[in-house]
Image (spheres, rainbow, N blue to C red):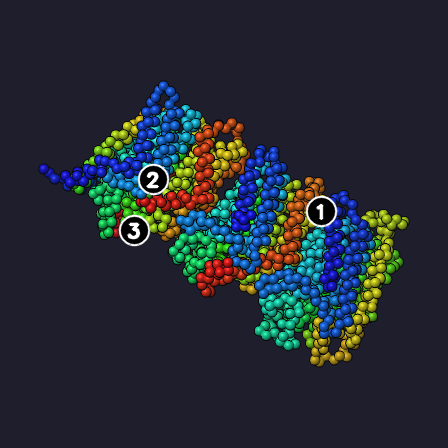
């Protein structure tokens, strides 16, 4: 079995996390933004798993389950909000959502 | 009565506020104005009466702080509700309780709208002012000090003149900025007490014992002193921090101006006496000359600028800058003569400038203008007014026999003992004071009565005479018998000086002697 | 499988009587959530009254239970994942009271705005429950879950005005940025876990203390990201951008709830995290110094930006949003000072309580003043308010003076305590900047006073009636603001008590 | 007992003042008559004259060394070791002043009853007049400098009030203000002098001060006090004198002060108030005598003023202005006397001057009254026959001031001239200046006299005898000149007698006055080395001849006005300079008033408003502008928000990593 270096996976997770984060500030579509957030959460999950494995501790892996659950709830709420928003604004483009400013 | 015996100060301080709160129950808006006026006036008289009890109980030469009250307040931080009165605050309190009924009486016709709030605020303001004079805990002092701003802010902002909002804002912010830095210094002091004595305390008598490094221009003492001084100098106001005053004075309603000049400005001087000097003696010695120079500038500058004012009220406001410069000069002379003179001048200024504002208010009510050029020859139609105006003017120019002379004479003499040169410069105020006052008087009261509007002016009413009479009596009484006032002041001035002159030998004597005396 | 054994301990499975007692507020609150949720689906009668009553009853009952617990000793719960101590009990009281008051004060507002959906109350209760759990959590994952319980409920509440574009927009912004921040927090947790092998705050601290030579960079990064998640929630500069928009877009009572409950919860948790990560307590290291530096700058920026931008605002709601940022700044000063002063974090606790009181009051007043669709909250709409509605104007004046920190109001006492402890901690410059910023703040608070008291009334719109409940909430807050301002000793004492249990 | 002296006028003031203010002042209220109010006032001052007389006699009966009556009433100000008693001390010096003040005062009060008979507000006038007497008596009776100062400023106030008595005339009101302010300038010096005395000697009480100063023995400096200090004190106090006694450079107010009613000019601006400077210098002679420099200054200023004012008086056409400049000039004389150490001579001249100048002023008042408020002497003439009684008394005054023996002026003036020459502090120059002044005095007084009373009338006379309608509308219809009523003439008579005979109290070598004043000013100082006593007679002769020459020349010149005009034209530049009073007012206006006014305005607009306020408001503006700037970041775009968040994250993390790496 091939041994994967933990730091490699961690770096990978970190990269994904930052891709997600960067996505939040460059993408305009709200649905994509939701996905970016999922991306960040999953990067965290990956990190937890790696640490869990490395530390030989179950707590990390258990956390992943909680996070996944919460992420699901979050997505549900997020999508609900997107729908509500779309109903009133007829758009999911964040550039169009700038009523509140300054 | 037993309660009153032990809590006389609390009673005097909070009576006006309580009275005002009850007064809120007087129903209706401006319809029941008569009842409201009567009630408020009665309250201010009651306070005045009660303060006489205070005068009676206070023993000249007794303990430094008398009629003390102390109750724990915020124990966690060593803050206590502690009150005490000494010979200096005694008179300032009496000045406050004396002026309040006068301004209330003077407001009867001047204020016609929103009387409920107006009279409430006046009495609330009285409580805050009295509180600041008797607080012997810095936290408590600060609370009263700041609380004063609120009623004054509304008095200026609601019942003031055309630019009232600008003036109210300026007044509030100017004074606040100064006092906030004082607050920081208070924190520091309180913390130092904890460090040096192991307990929390913000009581003055405890803080007096602090030993703070005082060498050099930017020592701890000096910085703290400057922080305190900023607050007080703004309040006094000392050149160049005076520019809020003309605006606030001019825009404020008459009562506001009187209280502002009569009592609020005294807070600055009082703050120097109660806090800045005794807490930071070395810094005081260090900055003595600097402050005396500023005071001398204030005296001359205020007088000069007053000369060219087209608005009577503004002229009086600048005259306040000049007069209060004397106070600072006297205090920083650091000798008994100067200090006594300064304290006396604070009382004088309350009476005479208060009187001037009342008089200006009276003609403003009649003519709705304060521009000097709109007047002329008023003596002809308002001879009684002219008499009163003349007397108050003379008090303002410090004619011997009036109160103003005693103050200025002692201050200049005291200052001369410390620095003849600065005293001589300051004494120029004697000349310029006469210049601006008499010139204004001449343009308003003398000359031909050539304006149509002025020909029908009514002379003082009986109520207005009642307003002015106590002030005029006070002007002469204080001019002829200052000793009556000095008597209860003397030992307090001594202990003030003793503390303020600790610069040379820093010995922790204060607290022991106070308790020892009791 | 030692770790598994380690996890499954007998006390985890059984709850002792004292633990049940300690958990009662949570149980009651949770039960309240469920009951009101069930009540709201009843179709036969209009559920608004029962739900309101249920909500208020829940809040009252739970907060009464919490108040009692302030005096009780700390108790570790659920295998150390939670703790019931004075600190959490104190804040539970604050959250529950805030939620209850908000519910009461919203009732007529919702009627007027045609938003009377019972989910509103349920969501309030849920978010309160989330706050309670969050402040008592000792495990980062529990913190996260509680945070999400709270946040998800609040996201929905912010967007509660479904038909309103601004409300939707606010909710969306809040949701996106909030989720991102949660993710950042979570990532930080993961890194901490990696660095210390534990997600338990006490254990993390223990690890930290056993390594006086310093921790790995991963720890540093993790702890900062964890803190950052909460710095976002409390809206400190530069993580504050969401706040004005959200505050403006949300329905007024929700904004009130957010500025009070949510901010208190986030700060309370921040205090716990702060302590757990070794800041504040005497664990000196370069890391401490660096985080201190960053927080110092953040605090100053927060005070400054909050205040100067508030100066330029003409909408009251948005102005209060910026002022809320400024208050975050003062709280950060307290946080920075917490470790170095004898007052500890009690100043922060005190300030949060006072801020909750005055802000709740202010927002209830705003909800009364607001016209259909949360309009009519511009400054000039307040012109002559003192003539039209003297008591409302008076109440708002009291709250604003308190926010400005003018004695004799609670705000002054709180600010005094915060700055005083900062001086003790040696943060003199921070205090000087702080008081100067608060001088700036006075200007915009006073400007409201100018409109209310010194300008002539405009228009002649008949004032809407104030509901009895909203009025009593406002009255209570006015009384509290003045009472705490004049006699702050008890609250100071309680706050001290709360932090000693940490 | 002493306190009664000022008390009576004070009571008179209070009665008249309160009555006027409360009862008569309202527009349209009935005014009390001059007879009644004047009666009260006259009684008050007369009572005080009686007390003064009685006290004088009491003093007279006491042994020479102990001629002091003291009355300490209460402590005025007591601060630490500074204890100021409110008290009076009467000795041989001020008893003379009280007699003059109350005596001449009574006469002038009496005269005023007639003079102010048609005034609108006699109650006010008499209350002021009484108040003045009160203050003046406080001034001379006070036992210490501050009390003297109390009176000093008090008389200044009354002077202000009375000069501006007809306040509706802006010019008159301005004159009052000018007087007050010029006096204030002097008072500044006085105040500082007092302070220096207190810090040097530790007391302000005259008796104690004298004791301290004389402790070192006669003529020696007190221990530990530098001569410079004493000189400074004396100069500072003398600055006060230049204000009050109208000396260079502060004399400018006195001529303007003639705006007041004529009795006021007589009482305040001739007989009493303006001499208080001499009183003070004499009172403090023990100090002045220690400092030759100070004495020199006093004498020099006195002589210069005497000459300077006399030159202006030469060409004035307003009857009162001439008298005013003559007063300034005579006051200069008195200072000249004091300045050469001849305090007695100074005081002597104060007294005789009080008599004859009061007489002249009141006479002038009578003329003005008779001429219906005409004051220009060029429009008079020939009044001799129309106002015979006034003519007679005025003539006596004229001769007295010219220094014709045996009228009083001769004795006092001569003594001053002689001492100016002979005293150790004196010099020929001082004498010469005095002598020239004397000639000029004789000239301009004769000019005045001649133009007023002699020759032919230069005004249109009205016919008919409507005494009652005459007042106020003389112009256009011609003037009906009438002699003044007895109530005015009678006091003139008394003063005329005093002017004629008053000099005999100080006849050279037999001087009662000198002896009487010895306890205060010390024995006669003798004469300087190298001056022959016999010169006294020579100089006396010279001065009399000078006076006669002056008189004759003037009589001759002004018998025909055309000659005089020709003379004026021949020296038109000088004439113009003199008519315009050497342009001193204009000079002061240009170097003090205008620059300070401009500066004040500049400071107000340029510093208060432009600098301080701009700074304060600017702070607010900067905050606001920063707010606006920061606000623009808040674009409303989620991306921007997230970006800022990310930026914060990266920056902080970066700082941490950088910090750890270091």
- Rate crowding at label 3 as few (under 14), some (14 to 19) or many (20 or more) other CA atoms within 10 Å: few
Kindly identify which numbered label has been placed on residue C279: none
Q: Tell me, yes or no, if residue D545 can be seen here.
A: yes
Q: Which residue is mark 3?
A: C282
Kindly identify which numbered label has been placed on residue B383: 1
Q: Is residue D636 above or below residue B291?
A: above
Q: Which type of secondary structure does the marked residue at label 3 adopt?
A: loop
Tags 1 and 2 both on a single chain: no
The span from disc 1 to disc 2 (Cα, nearest Å) is 76 Å
Q: Quadrant of the N terminus of chain D?
A: bottom right
| Front residue of D514 and A27 | D514
x then y, percent, for residue D21? 73, 49
Label 1 or label 3, whichever lies nearer to me, is: 3
x then y, percent, for residue C182? 29, 36
Which residue ends up furthest to the right in the rendered image? D464
| Picture quadrant where residue D213 is located | bottom right
x then y, percent, for residue B377? 70, 46
Residue drawn at 82 percent across, 52 percent down: D35
């Amino acid at each position: 079995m091939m041994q994967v270096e933990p730091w490699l996976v961690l770096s990978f997770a970190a990269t994904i996390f930052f891709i997600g984060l960067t996505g939040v500030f460059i993408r305009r579509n709200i649905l994509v933004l939701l996905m970016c957030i999922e991306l960040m959460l999953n990067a965290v999950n990956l990190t937890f798993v790696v640490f869990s494995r490395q530390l030989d501790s179950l707590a990390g892996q258990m956390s992943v389950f909680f996070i996944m659950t919460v992420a699901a709830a979050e997505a549900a709420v997020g999508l609900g909000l997107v729908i509500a928003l779309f109903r009133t604004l007829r758009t999911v483009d964040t550039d169009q959502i700038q009523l509140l400013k300054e | 009565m037993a309660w009153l015996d032990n809590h006389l100060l609390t009673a005097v301080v909070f009576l006006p506020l309580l009275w005002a709160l009850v007064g809120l129950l007087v129903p209706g808006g401006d319809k029941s104005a008569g009842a409201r006026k009567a009630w408020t006036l009665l309250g201010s008289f009651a306070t005045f009466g009660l303060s006489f009890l205070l005068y009676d109980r206070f023993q000249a030469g007794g303990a430094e702080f008398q009629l003390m009250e102390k109750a724990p307040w915020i124990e966690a931080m060593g803050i206590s509700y502690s009150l005490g009165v000494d010979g200096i605050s005694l008179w300032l309190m009496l000045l406050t309780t004396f002026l309040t009924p006068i301004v209330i009486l003077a407001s009867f016709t001047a204020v016609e709208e929103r009387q409920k709030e107006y009279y409430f605020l006046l009495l609330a303001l009285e409580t805050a002012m009295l509180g600041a004079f008797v607080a012997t805990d810095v936290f408590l002092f600060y609370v009263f000090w700041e609380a004063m701003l609120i009623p004054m802010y509304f008095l200026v902002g609601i019942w003031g003149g055309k630019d009232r909002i600008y003036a109210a804002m300026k007044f509030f912010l100017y004074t606040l900025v100064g006092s906030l830095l004082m607050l920081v210094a208070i924190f520091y002091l309180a913390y130092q007490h904890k460090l040096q004595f192991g307990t929390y305390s913000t009581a003055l008598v405890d803080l007096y014992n602090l030993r703070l490094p005082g060498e050099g221009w930017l020592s701890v003492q000096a910085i703290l002193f400057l922080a305190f001084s900023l607050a007080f100098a703004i309040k006094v106001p000392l050149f160049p921090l005076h520019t809020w005053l003309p605006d606030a004075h001019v825009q404020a309603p008459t009562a506001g101006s009187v209280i502002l000049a009569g009592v609020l400005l005294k807070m600055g001087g009082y703050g120097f006496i109660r806090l800045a000097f005794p807490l930071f003696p070395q810094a005081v010695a260090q900055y003595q000359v600097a402050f005396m120079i500023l005071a001398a500038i204030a005296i001359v500058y205020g007088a000069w600028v007053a000369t060219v004012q087209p608005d009577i009220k503004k002229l009086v406001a600048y005259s306040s800058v000049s007069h209060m410069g004397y106070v600072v000069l006297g205090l920083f002379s650091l000798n008994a003569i100067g200090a006594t003179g300064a304290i006396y001048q604070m009382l004088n200024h309350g009476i005479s400038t208060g009187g001037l504002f009342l008089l200006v208010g009276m003609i403003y009510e009649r003519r709705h203008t304060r521009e000097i050029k709109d007047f002329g020859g008023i003596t002809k139609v308002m001879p009684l007014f002219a008499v009163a105006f003349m007397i108050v003017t003379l008090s303002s120019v410090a004619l011997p026999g009036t109160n103003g002379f005693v103050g200025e004479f002692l201050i200049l003499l005291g200052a001369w003992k410390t620095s003849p040169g600065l005293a001589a410069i300051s004494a120029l105020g004697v000349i310029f004071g006469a210049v601006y006052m008499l010139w204004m008087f001449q343009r308003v009261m003398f000359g031909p009565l050539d304006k149509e509007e002025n020909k029908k002016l009514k002379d003082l009413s009986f109520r207005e005479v009642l307003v002015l009479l106590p002030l005029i009596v006070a002007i002469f009484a204080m001019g002829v018998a200052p000793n009556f006032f000095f008597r209860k002041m003397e030992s307090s001035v001594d202990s003030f000086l003793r503390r303020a002159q600790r610069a040379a030998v820093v010995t922790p004597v204060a607290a022991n002697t106070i308790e020892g005396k009791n | 499988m030692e770790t598994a054994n380690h996890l499954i301990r007998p006390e985890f499975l059984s709850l002792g009587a004292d633990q049940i007692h300690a958990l009662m507020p949570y149980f009651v609150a949770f039960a309240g959530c469920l009951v009101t949720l069930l009540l709201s689906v009843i179709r036969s009668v209009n559920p608004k009254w029962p739900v309101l009553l249920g909500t208020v009853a829940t809040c009252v009952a739970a907060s009464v239970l919490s108040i009692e617990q302030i005096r009780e000793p700390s108790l570790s719960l659920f295998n150390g994942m939670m703790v019931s101590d004075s600190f959490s009990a104190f804040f539970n009281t604050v959250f529950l009271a805030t939620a209850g008051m908000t519910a009461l004060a919203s009732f007529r507002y919702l009627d007027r705005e045609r938003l009377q959906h019972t989910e509103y109350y349920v969501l309030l209760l849920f978010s309160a429950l989330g706050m309670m759990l969050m402040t008592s959590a000792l495990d980062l994952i529990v913190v996260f879950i509680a945070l999400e319980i709270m946040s998800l409920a609040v996201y929905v509440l912010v967007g509660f005005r479904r038909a309103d574009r601004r409300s939707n927009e606010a909710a969306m912004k809040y949701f996106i940025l909030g989720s991102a921040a949660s993710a950042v927090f979570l990532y930080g947790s993961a890194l901490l876990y990696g660095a210390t092998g534990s997600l338990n705050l006490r254990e993390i601290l223990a690890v930290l203390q056993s390594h006086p030579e310093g921790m790995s960079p991963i720890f540093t990064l993790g702890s900062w990201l964890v803190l950052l998640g909460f710095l976002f929630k409390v809206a400190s500069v530069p993580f504050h951008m969401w706040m004005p928009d959200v505050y403006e877009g949300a329905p007024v009572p929700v904004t009130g709830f957010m500025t009070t409950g949510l901010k208190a919860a986030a700060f309370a948790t921040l205090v716990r995290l702060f302590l757990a990560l070794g800041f504040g307590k005497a664990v000196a290291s370069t890391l401490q110094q660096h985080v201190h530096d960053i927080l110092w700058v953040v605090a100053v920026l927060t005070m400054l930006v909050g205040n100067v931008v508030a100066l330029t605002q003409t909408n009251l709601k948005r102005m209060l949003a910026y002022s809320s940022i400024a208050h975050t700044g003062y709280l950060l000063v307290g946080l920075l000072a917490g470790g170095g002063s004898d007052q500890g974090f009690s100043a922060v606790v005190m300030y949060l309580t006072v801020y909750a009181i005055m802000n709740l009051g202010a927002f209830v007043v705003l909800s009364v003043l607001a016209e259909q669709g949360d309009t009519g909250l511009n400054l000039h709409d307040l012109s002559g308010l003192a003539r039209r509605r003297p008591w409302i104007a008076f109440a708002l004046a009291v709250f604003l003076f308190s926010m400005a920190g003018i004695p004799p109001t609670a705000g002054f006492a709180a600010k005094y305590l915060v700055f005083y402890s900062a001086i003790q901690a040696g943060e003199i410059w921070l205090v000087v900047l702080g008081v100067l910023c608060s001088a700036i703040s006075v200007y915009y608070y006073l400007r409201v006073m100018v409109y209310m008291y010194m300008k002539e009334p405009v228009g002649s719109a008949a004032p809407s009636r104030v509901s009895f409940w909203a009025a009593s909430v406002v009255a209570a807050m006015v009384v509290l603001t003045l009472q705490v301002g004049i006699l702050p000793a008890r609250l100071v004492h309680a706050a001290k008590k709360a932090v000693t249990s940490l | 007992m002493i306190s009664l002296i000022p008390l009576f006028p004070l009571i008179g003031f209070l009665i008249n003042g309160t009555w006027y203010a409360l009862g008569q002042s309202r527009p349209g209220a009935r005014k009390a008559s001059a007879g009644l109010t004047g009666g009260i006032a006259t009684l008050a001052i007369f009572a005080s004259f009686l007390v003064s007389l009685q006290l004088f006699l009491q003093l007279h009966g006491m042994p020479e060394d102990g001629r002091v009556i003291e009355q300490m009433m209460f402590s005025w100000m007591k601060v630490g070791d500074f204890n100021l008693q409110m008290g009076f001390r009467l000795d041989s010096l001020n008893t003379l002043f009280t007699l003059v003040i109350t005596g001449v005062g009574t006469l002038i009060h009496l005269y005023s009853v007639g003079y102010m008979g048609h005034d609108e507000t006699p109650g006010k006038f008499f209350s002021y007049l009484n108040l003045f007497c009160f203050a003046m008596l406080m001034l001379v009776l006070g036992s210490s400098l501050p009390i003297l100062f109390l009176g000093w400023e008090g008389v200044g106030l009354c002077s202000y009030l009375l000069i501006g008595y007809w306040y509706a005339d802006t010019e008159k009101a301005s004159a009052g203000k000018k007087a007050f302010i010029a006096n204030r300038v002097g008072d500044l010096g006085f105040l500082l002098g007092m302070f220096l005395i207190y810090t040097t000697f530790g007391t302000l009480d005259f008796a104690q001060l004298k004791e301290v100063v004389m402790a070192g023995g006669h003529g020696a400096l007190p221990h530990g006090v530098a001569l410079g200090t004493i000189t400074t004190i004396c100069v500072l106090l003398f600055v006060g004198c230049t204000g009050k006694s109208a000396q260079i450079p502060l004399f400018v107010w006195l001529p303007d002060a003639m705006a007041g009613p004529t009795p006021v000019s007589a009482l305040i601006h001739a007989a009493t108030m303006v001499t208080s400077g001499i009183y003070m210098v004499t009172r403090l002679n023990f100090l002045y005598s220690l400092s030759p420099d100070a004495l020199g200054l006093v004498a020099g200023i006195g002589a210069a003023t005497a000459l300077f004012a006399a030159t202006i008086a030469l060409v004035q056409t307003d009857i009162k202005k001439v008298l005013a400049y003559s007063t300034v000039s005579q006051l200069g004389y008195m200072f000249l006397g004091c300045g050469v150490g001849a305090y007695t001579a100074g005081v002597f001249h104060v007294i005789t001057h009080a008599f004859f100048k009061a007489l002249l002023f009141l006479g002038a008042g009578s003329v003005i009254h008779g001429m219906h408020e005409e004051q220009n002497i060029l429009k008079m003439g020939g009044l001799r026959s129309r106002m015979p009684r006034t003519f007679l008394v005025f003539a006596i005054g004229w001769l007295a001031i010219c220094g014709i023996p045996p009228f009083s002026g001769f004795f006092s003036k001569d003594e001053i001239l002689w001492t100016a020459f002979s005293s150790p502090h004196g010099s020929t120059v001082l004498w010469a200046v005095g002598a020239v002044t004397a000639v000029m005095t004789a000239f301009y007084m004769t000019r005045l006299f001649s133009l007023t009373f002699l020759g032919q009338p230069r005004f249109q006379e009205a016919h008919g005898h409507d005494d009652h309608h005459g007042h106020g509308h003389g112009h256009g219809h011609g003037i009906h000149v009438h002699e003044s009523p007895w109530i005015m003439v009678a006091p003139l008579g008394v003063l005329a007698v005093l002017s004629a005979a008053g000099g005999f109290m100080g006849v050279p070598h037999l001087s009662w006055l000198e002896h009487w004043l010895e306890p205060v000013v010390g024995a006669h100082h003798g004469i300087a080395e190298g001056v022959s006593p016999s010169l006294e007679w020579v100089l006396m002769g010279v001065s009399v001849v000078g006076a006669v020459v002056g008189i004759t020349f003037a009589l001759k010149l002004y018998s025909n006005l055309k000659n005089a005009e020709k003379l004026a034209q021949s020296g038109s530049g000088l004439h113009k300079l003199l008519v315009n009073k050497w342009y001193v007012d204009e000079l002061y206006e240009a170097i003090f008033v205008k620059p300070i006014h401009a500066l004040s305005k500049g400071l107000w607009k340029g510093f208060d408003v432009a600098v301080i306020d701009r700074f304060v408001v600017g702070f607010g503006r900067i905050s606001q502008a920063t707010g606006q700037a920061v606000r623009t970041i808040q674009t409303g775009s989620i991306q921007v928000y997230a970006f800022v968040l990310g930026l914060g994250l990266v920056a902080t993390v970066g700082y941490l990593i950088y910090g750890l790496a270091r």
